[in-house]
Image (cartoon, rainbow, N blue to C red):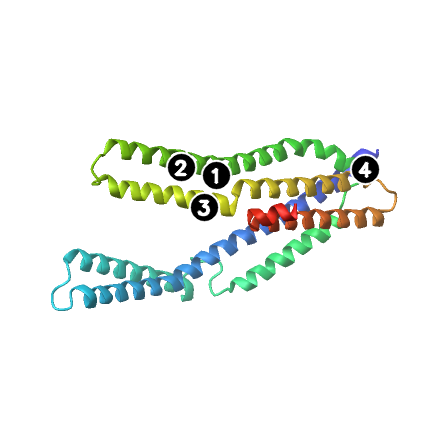
Amino acid sequence: MTEPANAPIDAETTDVLIQHRRNIADLKQRIRNRHLQVLGLYGTPIVILVALTTWVGLKISFWLHSNTPDAIDNITSIAVLLSAISFIVQAVAEFSNDLNVWRDRKTPVKKLRLELSLAEERHVLEARRRTPPPIDRQATYRERLPGEIARLRQESRYYRRIHLFMQWMLFISSAAISAVTAWYDPPQPAKGALICLGFAVTVITAAAGYFKPRERAFNLQLTADSIEQNATALELGIPPYDAVEEKRNLALFATTVEDLRAEQRMREQQLDQPQQGQQQVI
């Protein structure tokens, strides 16, 4: 008799929380769309001004006493014409009361962000009020593991591909320098290729050594995994968050997360320091 009575409550709770998530996702998409709308509306006049300014600058600098080439005139005219048409269309969509093409026309992005913040707060309060017992959370945790594992693997592949791309660029550019040098005995036309390849090697090496994408990705992933592990332990009520008092578990969780964030900031500071400074810190 107990299970049928609880079924409608569980279904209602699920529907309410899903609706909150849909509202939050919809607001995030509306904010992204509004950013693009504002950028297009106020960016096209800037494009027109830049195109005309560039044409005038070229005219004064190179063709003051002669006609500018037809290619430059055509490119400038096409850019100005397309930008003007785009601005007119966007202005009509933004300010016309007869057309409802844009959902959030005349709506500031700040207002949408406020609505998003309120929606997230309502979701947190509703989730807190409708939190199921620990045994139910433990039962659903196993079902979420495959998606979480897939997400972590996808992020790992993403950072690994960036690192491998930079390494292969270094390998190819370094090998091409030697190949071009051996293939072309005269300075030309290999001189330009050697300059470009040497520049690419220098830039990639300097960027990899300064920004350290591999180390930063590893540290960020390590901190995220540690925080997620503690959050999962708190949710499931397993050690070290298995105390009877919820207040004690929350205090321990906050302290642990802040320690992890402090360690992450320290690792970031060590990466920003020169190699000699890192050795002194270590």
SS category of the residue bearing label 3 = helix
Answer with left or right where residue 174 lies relative to residue 31. left
What number is the disc on residue 169? 2
Q: Nearer the viewer, mark 3 or mark 1?
A: 3
Q: Would residue 45 be seen by someone viewing this image from the given angle?
A: yes
Residue under label 4: 239
Residue under label 1: 162
* Amino acid tagged 3: Ala
Label 2 or label 1, whichever comes before in sequence order:
1
Quarter of the picture containing the N terminus is top right
Identified at 42% across, 43% down, the residue is: 204
Q: Neighbour class for label 1 at 10 Å: few (<14), some, many (≥20)? A: few
Quarter of the picture containing the C terminus is top right
Label 2 or label 3, whichever comes before in sequence order:
2
Identified at 59% across, 33% down, the residue is: 150
Q: Nearer the viewer, mark 2 or mark 3?
A: 3
Choose between 137 and 201: the one closer to the eye. 201
Q: Neighbour class for label 3 at 10 Å: few (<14), some, many (≥20)? A: few
Q: CA distance from mark 2 to mark 1?
A: 11 Å
Q: CA distance from mark 4 to mark 3?
A: 45 Å
Kindly indicate whether the residue at mark 4 contacts the one at mark 2 (C-beta within 8 angstroms): no
Relative to 209, residue 45 above or below: below
What number is the disc on residue 136? none
Q: CA distance from mark 3 to mark 1?
A: 15 Å
Identified at 30% across, 32% down, the residue is: 179
